[in-house]
Amino acid sequence: MSDSALASWLDIEILPALGGQPKVSLRNKTSIYAQELGIHGFSVSITHTKELAMAYVIAQSE
């Protein structure tokens, strides 16, 4: 089965946590797939200027 059948970009959202820091929210099959991979958390960094935006996410497992 291809990875695209196991996860969807539409099921991944970046939301503000308490204090305003960004957090990853997974839904549906993407959440299940992350659990199967042993992913238990994410580190998120977002920055921007007037012209550009950049973000990166690191998935954390044991």
Image (cartoon, rainbow, N blue to C red):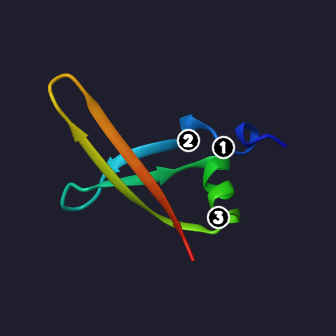
Q: Residue at x 67, y 57 (%)?
A: 32
Classify residue 46 as left or right of residue 32. Answer: left
Q: Secondary structure at mark 3?
A: helix
Classify residue 6 as left or right of residue 56. Answer: right
Q: Between 29 and 3, which is closer to the camera in this rendering? A: 3
Classify residue 41 as left or right of residue 18. Answer: right
Mark 1 touches mark 2? (CB < 8 Å) = yes
Amino acid type shown at disc 3: Gln
Q: Residue at x 42, y 51 (%)?
A: 57
Which label sits on residue 7? 1
Q: Quadrant of residue 14?
A: top left
Relative vertical location of residue 60 with respect to residue 3 in this rendering, above or below: below
Q: Estimate the x, y position of residue 60 in percent, counting from the top left.
A: 50, 66
Amino acid type shown at disc 1: Ala
Residue tagged 2? 11
Dot 3: few (<14), some (14–19), or many (≥20) neighbours within 10 Å? few
Q: Quadrant of residue 55?
A: top left
Q: Residue at x 55, y 35 (%)?
A: 10
